[in-house]
Amino acid sequence: MKSFRRVRLMSFLLMALMTFSLTANTTPISAAESERNNGVKVMDRVRLAEKNRQKFLGDYQSLLTRTDPDLIAMKERLVYGEIVERGTLNDHQRMLVTLVALAASRTLEEMKIQTEAALRVGLSPVEIKEALYQCAPYIGFPGTESALRLVNEAFVEKGIPLPVESQATVTEESRFRDGLTAQKAIFGDSIDKMHASAPEGQKDIMVNCLSAFCFGDFYTRKGLDLKTRELLTFSIVSALGGCEAQVKAHVQGNANMGNTRQNLIDALAQMLPYIGFPRTLNALGCVNAVMQDS
């Protein structure tokens, strides 16, 4: 009996020793592998930032690179190491969204360099101008004009003739009719109900200005299609902040035009470094509220 117990004890000790040996050998390796994998991801982010930064910005260096290198490194690794590598937007869409976000948020310090980036990835001067013109009904003419002055400076430095070719399609006689057609193409027959319910004394704003000015003068222009214009309008009103009712309306407009929920989420991700988290999250809440199942 004692011999049997000794055999069982030895077997137990041997198994325990083997388990300890396996654990001792594999745990450090697993931790090391995890650390190496994380290091690879970090280096990928750094390398991607360097590659994409060159693609979009060329040899441009912010003056803050010398005085505030940590901040610029965080910004560029976020923008060029993460955001431009994610999602459904192409380079043209990313740059158009960036330009209107800068204009809408009145942060124009980067307007020239981002205009140059837009040209570098293949956007035409007309497309850039039309994206900025699209801001006017939502941020007003002074803010739009301030952004355009910097765009024009970038164009002149690049030898691009001004003015660019006009993209207007309406006349004084047709702007209301054509604007209403564009408005209904995006929002459907609900526009008729909105016109009918507009209070007296407000119809000039809710009917005439909205259909003739906002949609007639801008949405009917060539250079950008309705689908792109509606994506930019969503981006503009999201960047403004405090416009949740309008953001929700244009989320639905984007859905009607064929832009997906992910397209809108990716537009917000593109704008995040320029407009900050509060406005980004508020707009994201609007997207989720309107396009829950998309």
Image (cartoon, helix red, strand yellow):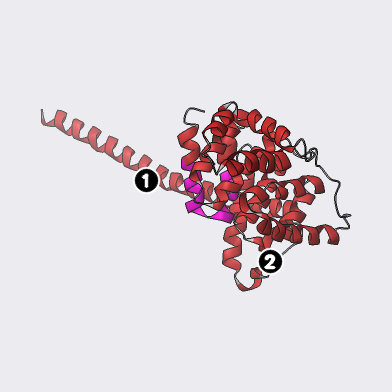
Near mark 1 (Cα within 10 A), the count class, few <14, some 14-19 or many ≥20, is: few
Q: Position of residue 51 (x, y in %)?
A: 70, 52
Magenta residue check for 282: yes
Side (left or right) of 16 relative to 173: left
Name the amino acid type tagged 1: Ala
Using residue 143 as the reference point, say whether residue 241 is left or right of it. left
Q: Which segment did they paint magenta? A: 266-285
Which is nearer the eye, 66 or 291?
291
Q: Nearer the viewer, residue 59 or 242?
A: 242
The furthest residue to the top: 189
Q: What element carries label 1?
A: helix
| Name of the residue lying farthest toward the bottom | 67
For disc 1, the marked residue is: 24
Q: Earlier in the sequence, mark 1 or mark 2?
A: 1
Residue located beneath label 2 in the image:
62
Residue at left offset 59%, top offset 70%: 68
Q: Which amino acid does label 2 sit on?
A: Ser
| Residue 112 sits inside the magenta stretch | no
Whether residue 124 is visible to the viewer of this picture, yes or no, is: no
Front residue of 185 and 263: 185
Q: Which residue is drawn at 64% across and 46% down?
A: 84
